[in-house]
Image (spheres, rainbow, N blue to C red):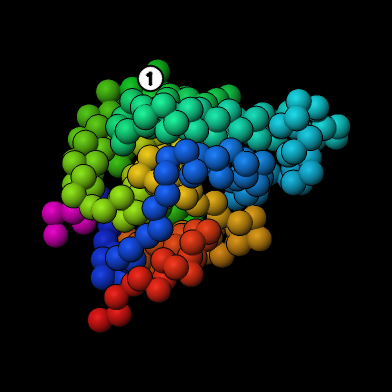
Amino acid sequence: MALFDALGFHWDRAALPVLVPVYSIERVCFRFHRMLPEFVWDASVLEGNPFTFPEVKTLLDGVTVGGRRVSDQEQVLNLAESSKRLLALVKSGRFELSKAIFVELHRLVARNEALEWGLFRGEGEETNYTPDVGLGTYGRHTPLRTLPGAPELNRVFQEGIAALADCPPFERALAFFLFGALQQFFFDGNKRTSRFMMNGILMSNGIDAISVPAARAQEFNEKMVRFYLTKDGTEMMAFLVDCHPDAEAIRSSVVVG
C-alpha cells in the first residue's frame, strides 16, 4: 500500500476505532491546559528524568528545585514551554501538520539537549553523524543516513505527510507519532516532538490529547522496541488508544472483523 510505503511501517487499519469522541477546540484545549503538569511529568519520566510530580509542579510554578541536575531541570522546562506553544498554536488555529511546525516545536523540546535543534539532521553544521536508537539485546535501529541538506529526510517527510492526508484525524495522529519516531528526523528528541505533533493533530480536530502515564513508561519502551524491530505499528497504536482519556468509548467503536 502507498501509505505504508511512504511511512516505512504498517499497521492493521481495521483495528483502529471508527468513532472517536469529538469536542470543541476550546474544550480540548482547556483540558490540556488543566493537565499540563501531568503531561509534562509523564513526558519527562519517559525520558528517564528523575523529577517527581510535586517537583515538576514546583518548577512550573517558577520555584527552583534543589538537588537536581541543571540538565534535568531544563528538560522539564523545555517540555513545559513546548506544551504551552502547542496549546497556543491549536487555540489560534495555526497548528498544521507541516515541517515548519515540526521544527518549531523541536526547537523548544530539544534546546540545549540535542546536537542541533530546530532543523532536520544534515541541515545544520553537522552533516555526517547518523544517530541510532538502542534496542537493548536486540541491537540498534539505524534510520536514514544524515546527508548535507537532508534531501532524503525532506523527501520522506513530504511523502509521508502527503500520504497521511487521506487518513482520518485519529489515525493520522497516531501514525505520525510512529513515523517521526521511526525516521528520526532530528538528532534527538524525536519521540517527544512527534508526540506533540500527534496531540496537535488530535486537539485541532476536537479530540483530547494523549499522555503516556508515567506508570506505563516501561510498557511504552518495550512496545516501542518491538515496533522498531517489526515495523508493525498495530501494537503501539492500540497502546496509545488505551492511554486516551476516552479509551473505553473508543475501543467500543472498533469493528471486529
Q: Secondary structure at mark 1?
A: loop
Q: Main secondary structure of the magenta part?
A: helix
Q: Residue at x 53, y 59 (%)?
A: 245
> Residue 42 or 206: which is nearer the viewer?
206
Q: Position of residue 147 (x, y in %)?
A: 29, 29
Q: Residue at x 54, y 34 (%)?
A: 83
Tell which residue pokes out farthest to the left in this image: 2
State which quadrant residue 11 falls in. bottom left
In the picture, measured across the screen, residue 81 lies left or right of residue 153, that is right
Q: Position of residue 2 (x, y in %)?
A: 13, 54
Q: Residue at x 78, y 40 (%)?
A: 55
Residue picked out by circle 1: 124
Q: Position of residue 183 (x, y in %)?
A: 34, 45
Tell which residue pokes out farthest to the bottom in this image: 257
- Identify residue type, mark 1: Gly
Q: Split into 4 quadrants, where in the image is the C terminus?
A: bottom left
Q: Residue at x 21, y 45 (%)?
A: 165
Residue 213 seen in render: yes
Q: Split into 4 quadrants, where in the image is the N terminus?
A: bottom left
Per the rendered image, the range of residues in magenta is 1-5
Tell which residue pokes out farthest to the top in this image: 125
> Residue 186 or 15: which is nearer the viewer?
15
In the picture, measured across the screen, residue 66 lies left or right of residue 158, that is right
Residue 136 falls inside the magenta stretch: no
Q: Position of residue 168 (x, y in %)?
A: 26, 53
Residue 101 seen in render: no
In the picture, measured across the screen, residue 178 lies left or right of residue 46, that is left
State which quadrant residue 253 falls in. bottom left
For residue 179, above or below residue 113: below
Q: Residues within 10 Å of mark 1 (few under 14, many from 20)?
A: some
> Residue 82 or 170: which is nearer the viewer?
170
